[in-house]
Image (cartoon, grey):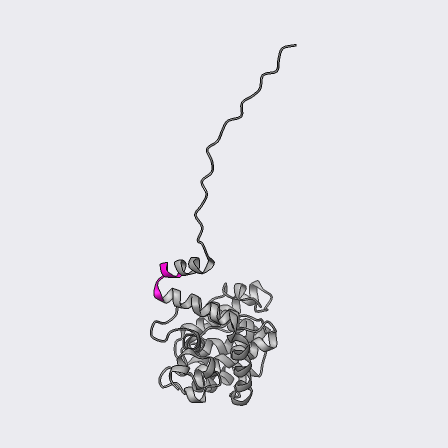
Amino acid sequence: MSATKKVKRPVWPAARRLQRPTSRRRSRTAVTSAMGPRVASAVCCVAMARKSIPQAFTRKLLAWYARAARDLPWRRTRDPYRVAVSEFMLQQTQVARVLEFYPRFLKRFPTLEKLARAKPKAVREAWEGLGYYARASNLHALARVVREANDGIIPETPEELRKLPGVGPYTAGAIATFAYEKPVAAVDTNVGRVIRRVFGNAERGMPNAEQWRLASMLVPKDGKRAWKFNQAMMELGALICVARKPKCRECPIQPQCRTGRRRR
């Protein structure tokens, strides 16, 4: 028998090890320093909110809402169609104005089926005086799409709602939480202002994506509490944390607010 030849294994060059930071703190500092000041500030706000703010913030906010909430007709219903009508009307329109048109429109089109079957001219006439008529056209188109493609049932999730005519991120979140009590965020102008002032820097502002991230973190997981929380955030922005001359001394969450603490 011939001697078995040994097969030489190739010698590969030693793998080059990656240099790692000596500490997690240094790594985080390096990351934030590479960001712009607005983004870095928002990241810090997210970290702060994740630690201690949410519980006290939510508890005080909901207690205030129980005392101060306005009695608005769309808050008395969980009917997805009626909630959708209110949300379309409230786009770029004051609550006082919508209070005048909301019952009148629903009297003429009490159900999604009635609206879907209506002529465009009839819908426009019912909307007459409210302005921004593209909203009426979008609402009418939504009713028709839902009737034909979804058996007249308005979807429950923001992802499905976003596929409907005239429905953006806020409207999708609002219908999902106010009609179906889904624990999702709904960031409109008022809510965004509250979040920027409480967690951000009023001078630098906060990216829209970070506002949504913070709002999603703060929304309670329980559906009923999520409904109240989102309503309360909007109410706070509409009545207390207004755009000009915010009423910080009347604000229930001033101790948790970065802007409010500076106004004491």
Which image quadrant: the N terminus? top right
Q: Which residues are magenta?
A: 32-37
- Residue most toward the front? 22
Q: Is residue 187 above or below residue 34?
A: below
- Residue 186 in percent (x, y) is at 49, 72
| Residue at the spot 36% in from the left edge and 67% down from the top edge | 38
Q: Is residue 36 magenta?
A: yes
Which image quadrant: the C terminus? bottom left
Q: Is residue 195 magenta?
A: no
- Residue most toward the left? 203
Q: Is residue 140 visible?
A: no
| Residue at the spot 43% in from the left edge and 48% down from the top edge | 19
| Residue 157 relative to residue 128: left or right | right
Q: Is residue 117 above or below residue 7?
A: below
| Residue at the spot 50% in from the left edge and 26% down from the top edge | 10
Q: Nearer the viewer, residue 176 or 167?
A: 176
- Residue 253 in percent (x, y) is at 48, 83
Q: Nearer the viewer, residue 6 or 170?
A: 6
| Residue at the spot 53% in from the left edge and 79% down from the top edge | 56
Q: Nearer the viewer, residue 243 or 123?
A: 243
- Residue most toward the right? 1
Q: Nearer the viewer, residue 237 or 167?
A: 237
